[in-house]
Image (tube, helix red, strand yellow):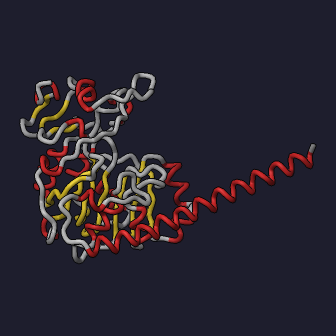
Amino acid sequence: MREALRKLRKKRNSEKRLIANIAKEIKKLKKLNAKLLIRNLGENKLLSDLSEAEFSVYSQFGEDGIIQYLLQRISDIPRSFIEFGVADYTEANTRFLLENNNWRGLILDCDAAAMDAIRSDDLFWMHDLTAAGAFVDCENINRLFLTNGFTGDIGLLSIDIDGNDYWVWNSIEAVRPKIVIVEYNSVFGPDIQVTVPYDPSFTRRKAHSSMLYWGCSLNALCTLASKKGYSFVGSESSGVNAFFVRTDSIEQLRPLSSTEGYNRSRIRQSRDDQNNLTFLSFEQSQQAIKDLPLYDLLGEGMSSLSQLLEI
């Protein structure tokens, strides 16, 4: 019996090593393919739509390709980034920058255990990466940057906290990124300027069981970007992330309005009270949260989708 168990364990360990080696080889192939795509992006002239540049190695919706495209069209870009809301960093907007472009970076997430795991991974000693566990809010965001050695001009900032994204970007003063990536809530549509009211303890799950009530509209981000000296240059085809470039560095890129650059998300991630997927359509998603409170940045007061969109 003991011998049989020993052989079984040996077989399982062998299978685990095989799976790990296959995963490494797949990653190598993805990186090699990405390098060929980057070369092709460099040969292309200005793209009419950022979605034409999409590819993913570590990003979820093609952001890796869009970032590489933007890097080739912005001069004198600092080789440093900040990203918060990264979970365990296996899927992120900046990991390809870290590994392919050898940038210096800071990542933040409220999951302290995930940050500990990253600090014990080979990735951490192989690259100039800082990982800090923190629940980001308007009051601590600048201190977190400064404490971890990031200030002034940086290359890229990626914001993905599914909640106070608008308010936190509005509060950032410690760094001046050349590129800013922020998630927008497609359910709010392309035209109105709204965000969830600021709550420093906001979490998407607690805010509403549907998981649809979070973040802000694209036009809210575009208006804020203009005030902070940035131009909106587009979003990826999935309708999740908006891309902004500091206006003093926009060079070859064409600024867009929120209506021109908006992509309606086809992602059906709505949930019921038991956290089961309900696969609501766009219109059904709007109905599900139409009466929840939103801060109307244009009217400077509280409102709702039912009032602003008359649904």
Q: Determine whether 125 is above or below 163 in the image.
A: below
Residue drawn at the location 23% of the way across and 29% of the way down:
283
To which quarter of the image does residue 101 belong? bottom left
Q: Is residue 294 visible?
A: yes
Q: Determine whether 27 is above or below 279 in the image.
A: below
Left or right: residue 122 compared with residue 187: right
Name the residue furthest bottom.
Answer: 76
The location of residue 77, given as percent across then percent down, is 26, 73
Residue drawn at the location 39% of the way across and 28% of the way down:
271
Q: Determine whether 132 is above or below 135 in the image.
A: below
To which quarter of the image does residue 296 belong? top left
Q: Nearer the viewer, residue 52 or 219?
A: 52
The location of residue 125, given as percent across then percent down, is 53, 69
Left or right: residue 156 compared with residue 56: left
The location of residue 38, given as percent across then percent down, is 35, 71
Q: Nearer the viewer, residue 78 or 11?
A: 11
Q: Nearer the viewer, residue 299 or 254?
A: 254
Q: Quadrant of the C terminus?
A: top left
Left or right: residue 123 compared with residue 289: right
The location of residue 187, given as percent across then percent down, is 24, 36
Q: Quadrant of the N terminus?
A: top right
Left or right: residue 198 compared with residue 269: left
Residue drawn at the location 37% of the way across and 29% of the way down:
279
Q: Is residue 154 visible?
A: no
